Amino acid sequence: MGLRTYLALGLATAALAVGGYVWRQNTVIKSQAAKIAGYERSLAALTRQAEQTALARRVEAARAERYAERAAELNASIEAILTGDIPDADLDPRIADFVNGLRKAD
């Protein structure tokens, strides 16, 4: 075996080593790309969830505001009934039923 044979074997071995290294790096890159894609999907899902949560908070705040306004109106009507300052406007049917129930109890 001459020098050319050893040189050819050395080059073949180096080519196999470089090929294996490239294959391994390609595998690592694909694995990392899959992880990144998973993180991007998770981020998109969490972003949608945060947007939905913010919308739900705004809806709930609006609902609570409407209920607070309605409660204030009803409290004012009850106070008017208790003080005898009954307005000429029609009463809420629930309040009228309550007052009629009080009258029957007397």
Image: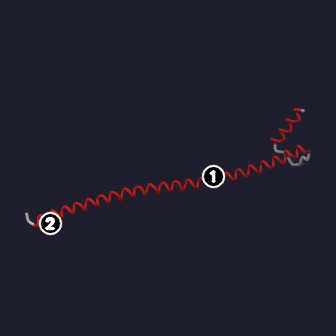
Q: Left or right of 54: which side holds 98? A: right
Amino acid tagged 2? Leu
Residue occupying the point 29% across, 61% down:
22
Query: In which quarter of the view is residue 4 placed?
Result: bottom left
Between discs 2 and 1, the one toward the N terminus:
2
Residue occupying the point 63% across, 52% down:
56
- In the picture as drawn, the residue positioned furthest to the left comes out as 1
Where in the figure is residue 23, as x and y percent of width and height? Answer: 29, 59
The dot on residue 56 is: 1
Amino acid tagged 1? Ala
Q: Pointer 2: what residue?
A: 7
Judging depth in this view, the residue of 46 and 74 nearest the camera is 46
> How far apart are the two marked residues, 2 and 1, measured between alpha carbons?
73 Å
Neighbor class of circle 2 (other Cα within 10 Å; few <14, some 14-19, many 20+) is few
- Residue contact between numbered discs 2 and 1, judged by CB atoms under 8 Å: no
Q: Quadrant of the N terminus?
A: bottom left
Indicate the secondary structure of the residue bearing disc 1.
Answer: helix
